[in-house]
Image (tube, rainbow, N blue to C red):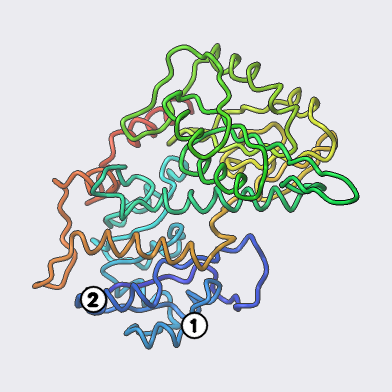
Amino acid sequence: MEIFVVNETPGVNEHSDDVSLERRCSATPATVKKLALAGASITIETGAGLLAGYSDENYIEAGATISQDRNAGLAKADIVLYVSRPTEADIEHLKAETLVIGHLDPFFQKPLIEKLQAKQVTAISVEMIPRTTRSQKMDALSSQTNLAGYVMVLKGATELDTILPMMMTPAGTVKPAKVFIIGAGVAGLQAIATAKRLGASVTAFDTRPVVAEQVQSLGAKFLEIDLGETGQTSQGYANALSEEQMQKQKEGQRQAIADSDLVITTAQLFGRKPPLIITEEDIAGMKPGSVIVDMAAENGGNVAGSQKGQTVVNNGVKIVGTGNWPNQVPKDASDLYANNLFNLLDEYWDKEAKRFVLDLEDDILDGCVIVHQQALRNAMLSKHFESIAGES
């Protein structure tokens, strides 16, 4: 089978420092070598790995072919790998039944999904891979949000005008910075661990009381707020709160926000707009020079006034909404993501026929294949699109 790896920042050289660019790549020389050994033919669009530290020569040595013709590569491919998602122009060049894999962001990309349907391609959205024991090695959402948790702490630390650890010197003692992390999923737990390693005093909150033990095992304090019955989905995501519960959360965490030097929000609801959990009133109660890092800024934000891709100042408080956090550590992010995709392909690879077998009865593929033979296959996504149509 022909696999094509897309360069998602064409024309950019390896010295670019523009953080808005996609710096990750969906394949590495290591995964190319394994795919080639499995009998796949891999073509890399020239420059695809440059910003992740991989040259075209690295890929050639691993067994890939380099192409400077993106459209020809798309037209020839049986499988196309993305970090993000295809452009509308890309879709025009795909042949029917091509398998497209990437972070398709399907709940917020309805026109793009409809174009994939019309083109009769098969699309896998890696965000939709079920969180099961068997699929852990393919779980790109977890691998990338893990890195996001680390990056957000470092970004917040560099924006502060104080240091994180306690420091005792002949000139005096510097108290440890207070860090408050809202949301203790994959990103939140990594943020807690990173902030603790850097010497901060860390408090965390999550709407799921079941994660309190995990927070405490990392050396952080868990903020107790009685919200009543909350729970989590079968995939481990927090359930949406009622308006009354949201108000209780805001009131319960207000003092922790005011006392903190650095606040990190990681609250996202799968397939839905993220909840607003830090208000203008909360920000007004913070010390000037404090910092908030909003993980959800790209999709609407957890913080009043946060801006996608920007750092803004409100009442002396910096609000960081840089977004695409794994993109800031592109080497490791690419390595992990490429491994996720290799594991996905390898799980369904027929070693004798040397091809990917699309088994829609399989529980993993049933969850993440969202488009096949013009049909929208995911029930949650179909319901979401129907609700959008009803609102318009």
Instruction: Using the image, tell me which numbered label, if any, was put on residue 152.
Output: none
Q: Nearer the viewer, residue 360 or 387?
A: 360
Q: In which quadrant will I find the N terminus? A: bottom left
Q: Quadrant of residue 225?
A: top right
Residue 45 horizontal/vertical position (percent): 43, 77
- Comes first in the chain, label 1 or label 2: 2
Residue 276 horizontal/vertical position (percent): 61, 28
Q: Nearer the viewer, residue 13 or 96?
A: 13
Q: Nearer the viewer, residue 263 or 117?
A: 263
Residue designated by label 1: 55
**What residue do we see at 55% from left, 27% from top?**
222
Residue designated by label 2: 40
**What residue do we see at 46% from left, 68% from top?**
25
- Per the image, label 1 sits on a secondary structure element best described as loop
Residue 179 horizontal/vertical position (percent): 67, 37
Label 2: how many residues lie within 10 Å, few (<14), some (14-19) or many (20+)?
A: many
Looking at this view, name the residue that lies furthest to the left.
352
From what the image shows, is residue 282 above or below residue 92?
A: above
